[in-house]
Image (cartoon, grey):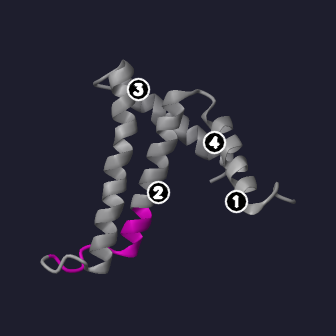
Amino acid sequence: MADDDVWAAIDDLWTWLDANDAHPGREGLLLRILKLSEEVGEVAQAVIGATGQNPRKGTTHTWDDVRSELCDVALTALVALRTLTPDAREVFTTHLERVRERSLGGPRIT
């Protein structure tokens, strides 16, 4: 999926969520951001399940489950960002470039 398609999908998901929002306004915004915590918890559950760390349950998940849950975290974060601003793509891209420069010591050379 191309970058444009990813952001079109984020917009589509945001539109769908807003149209079906049981809690509009500030409360809905806060709940959408809190949804991230739920998704991160599902990543933790999948990691514990993939490693069999709960002796009572054993191995209950796979590393594919972990990858899927991580994708849910990323999607939830991007939709939450889109909820905060219609310029989510630009905000994310600018932030990503700042993190890259800070972490890797300069702009990307192409």
Percent coordinates x, y for residue 12 in the rendering: 51, 35
Percent coordinates x, y for residue 61 in the rendering: 29, 73
Task: Please tell me whether mark 2 sits on a helix, a strand or a loop.
Answer: helix
Q: Which residue is mark 2?
A: 71
Amino acid type, label 1? Ser
Q: Which residue is mark 4?
A: 92
Amino acid type, label 3? Asp
Task: Please tell me whether mark 3 sits on a helix, a strand or a loop.
Answer: helix
In screen coordinates, is 19 left or right of 48?
right
Q: Which residues are magenta?
A: 57-68
Q: Which mark is residue 18?
A: 3
Percent coordinates x, y for residue 28 in the rendering: 35, 26
Gap in angstroms between the C-alphas marked 4 and 1: 16 Å
Gap in angstroms between the C-alphas marked 2 and 1: 23 Å
Q: Nearer the viewer, mark 1 or mark 3?
A: 1
Amino acid type, label 4? Phe
